[in-house]
Amino acid sequence: MKKAVITGVRKAEIVECPTPKAVGNWALIKIHSTPMCTEYKSFLAGHESRYLGHEAAGEVVEVAQPGRVKVGDRVAVMPQYGCGVCEYCVSGYYIHCRNSIDPRKYTGQTEGWATYAQYMLKPDWMLPAIPEGLSYDRAALAGCALGPSFAAMDAANVSAFDTVLITGLGPVGLGAVVNAAYRGAKTIVVESAPWRVELAKKMGVTMVADPGSPDCVKEIRAFTGDRGVDCAVDCSGAPQAQRVCIESLRRLGAMCFVGESTEKVSIHASADMIRNGIRLFGIWFYNMNLFPKLMEVVTNSPLIGLLVSHRLPMSDIQKAMELSASPEHGKIILHPWE
């Protein structure tokens, strides 16, 4: 089979490798759609990688034993490899599994866990069925494009009565705009990149705030009549943006950390949380029991066409990586068989 790899600084290419085989309850998936995510960071840094990607949608083409999927099933591919039996996996929060399986040890194979590839292996319980009639490209958005922010807004009970603040409009932040709009909420975004700002306006956001303005928080609060926003979702991972979220919240509001970061943010227990009664929490991925609801957004949102900005053949991986490393794109979908 063919797959994409990073071979050096700003260098990516297609290589040939063995096609994996189904084993145990791990099915073989023919990948039709692969969303690009943060792999561009390794591309820019030159971290060589032969196993790229963590989300996809495709078709079951081989099973080793009877199980939850069969050949011909159209499925979404969930990220990571949970054990499937611990309390977190059983409750749907498998992303927090502390006994994650090493696919090399379980399968005894050298391939099968990259999504920038034509085939991959996945436990059958991590392959929810795609609704009939839904395209693979749309179904692939069940990963990072929409999943984390969907979980954040579900946990915050966002509704049409609320105003939601979203900081950072990369593909995940743009997905948050889609989720907020689907719930009928007013949306304020904080972003400076012109291309992303224009796309957010096309998506119907209520207000765009400049993160470089020293009065960013004042402007956001003034827009809400100084009440503050009901919910804030940081998709940037930047401490400055996270502080904007916290300081823009109304009393008893909720703020979710979605964007990954290696930097620390300053949080004041009394001034931020106790006196204002706000709730701060983090979301890595959604509970699998929310998959049917997320599929409603994927199927019915009129903004999906704007969220997916590019569809590219995986054979153009160098071009795709260069684009992914720029600020001028929404979600990019790779087609491994082109």
Image (spheres, rainbow, N blue to C red):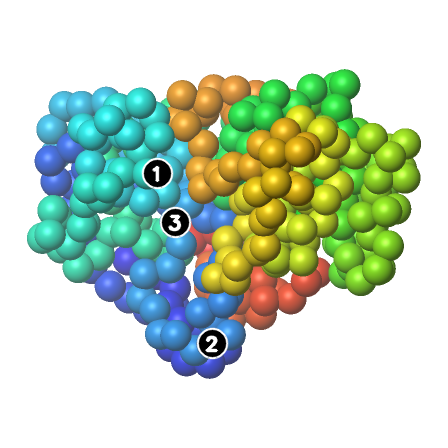
Give the structural element (helix, strand or loop) at label 1. helix
- Residue 95 - label: 1
Crowd rating for badge 2 (residues with CA inside 10 Å; few <14, some 14–19, many 20+):
few
> Compared to 288, does 32 lie above or below?
below
Q: Residue placed at 20% from the left, 30% from the top?
A: 86
Residue 276, image x and y in percent? 68, 32
Residue 16, image x and y in percent? 28, 66
Q: Residue placed at 41% from the left, 28% from the top?
A: 287
Give the structural element (helix, strand or loop) at label 2. helix
- The residue indicated by pointer 2 is 45
**Residue 52 found in image quarter:** bottom left
Between the residue at mark 2 and the residue at mark 1, the CA separation in whole angstroms equals 27 Å
> Compared to 85, does 17 lie above or below?
below
- From the image, state whether disc 3 or disc 1 is nearer to you: 1
- Identify which amino acid the numbered label 3 is placed on: His
Sequence-earlier tag: 2 or 1: 2
**Residue 88 found in image quarter:** top left
Query: As drawn, is 178 to the left or to the right of 107?
Result: right
Sequence-earlier tag: 3 or 1: 3
Residue 85, image x and y in percent? 18, 28
- From the image, state whether disc 2 or disc 1 is nearer to you: 1
Crowd rating for badge 1 (residues with CA inside 10 Å; few <14, some 14–19, many 20+):
some
- The residue indicated by pointer 3 is 54
Kindly tell me whether residue 303 is visible in this rendering. Answer: no
Between the residue at mark 3 and the residue at mark 2, the CA separation in whole angstroms equals 19 Å
Between the residue at mark 3 and the residue at mark 1, the CA separation in whole angstroms equals 12 Å
- Identify which amino acid the numbered label 1 is placed on: Ile
- From the image, state whether disc 3 or disc 2 is nearer to you: 2
